[in-house]
Image: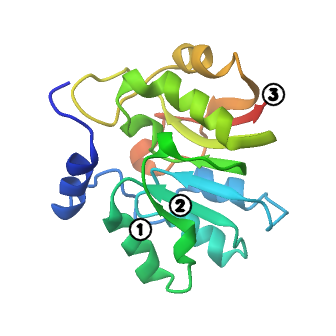
Amino acid sequence: MNQTLNKEYWKKRYQENEIGWDAGSVTTPIKEFIDQLNDTNVKILIPGAGNAYEAEYLWKCGFKNIFVIDIVEEPLQNLKSRIPDFPDEQLILGDFFELKDSYDLILEQTFFCALNPNLREAYVKQMFSLLKPNGKLAGVLFDFPLTKQEPPFGGDYQMYLSLFNPIFAIKKFEACYNSIKPRAGKEFFILLEKL
């Protein structure tokens, strides 16, 4: 890999508007999952949230116990400008791997694929530690060969299964039928439960 995926790298991507992963709104797989949630009191984390359209959609659907973490300030400010009454204490500027709290649900949307692949085992362990008993990790993972130069980094079913299966119950792990057009045929939807 030819660069360090650190705070400076991501800050530069936002400042130069090199955010090709940004769909401009909540994507269909996440939206349809959110639409099935009944308890608006659940405590939700969106890590590496970027512009956090998922948080915005949740907020508009009546969910108020939403926490968003990103390593750079720009996307958090973007969310705050769209939802001025979003609580500041629920916008976390920091490193996901240093976060200490517990959540009922964590939403995965282009965070896993943005991390250096050598952090994947640490990602799985941190997700496990952040979830309450029977907590769930839900969202999308990319389904294309693992790239080596820069994000997004892909993977395949077996690779992902070998990471998650030892400590999570696999509730759903299937090809997305409702991906947005640019990602059609390239996404898995996952719903994993902490054992």
How many other residues sit within 10 Å of disc 1, few (<14), some (14-19) or many (≥20)?
A: many
Q: Quadrant of residue 139?
A: top right
Quarter of the image for the C terminus: give it.
top right
Q: Where in the figure is residue 26, as x and y percent of width and height? A: 52, 62
Q: Residue at x 63, y 22 (%)?
A: 164
Q: Quadrant of residue 24?
A: bottom left
In the displayed structure image, the side of residue 135 where residue 50 appears, left or right = left
Q: Which residue is mark 2?
A: 68
Q: Residue at x 71, y 51 (%)?
A: 103
> Secondary structure under badge 3?
loop
Task: Judge by depth and name the residue closer to the eye, 181 or 65.
Answer: 65
**What amino acid does circle 3 point to?**
Leu
Q: Where in the figure is residue 183, as x and y percent of width and height? A: 43, 43
Q: Mark 1 or mark 3: which comes first in sequence?
A: 1
Q: Where in the figure is residue 177, as x and y percent of width and height? A: 61, 41
Marks 1 and 3, how far apart in space? 32 Å
Residue farthest toward the bottom in the current orientation of the protein: 84
Q: Mark 2 or mark 3: which comes first in sequence?
A: 2
Q: Which residue is mark 1?
A: 76
Residue 97, labelled with which disc? none
Task: Judge by depth and name the residue closer to the eye, 82 or 99.
Answer: 99
Q: Mark 2 or mark 1: which comes first in sequence?
A: 2
Q: Are marks 2 and 1 in contact (CB under 8 Å)?
A: yes
Residue 195, labelled with which disc? 3
Q: Is residue 66 visible?
A: yes
Residue 61, relative to residue 47: is it above or below?
below
Marks 2 and 3, how far apart in space? 24 Å
> Secondary structure under badge 2?
strand
Residue 37, relative to residue 9: is it above or below?
below
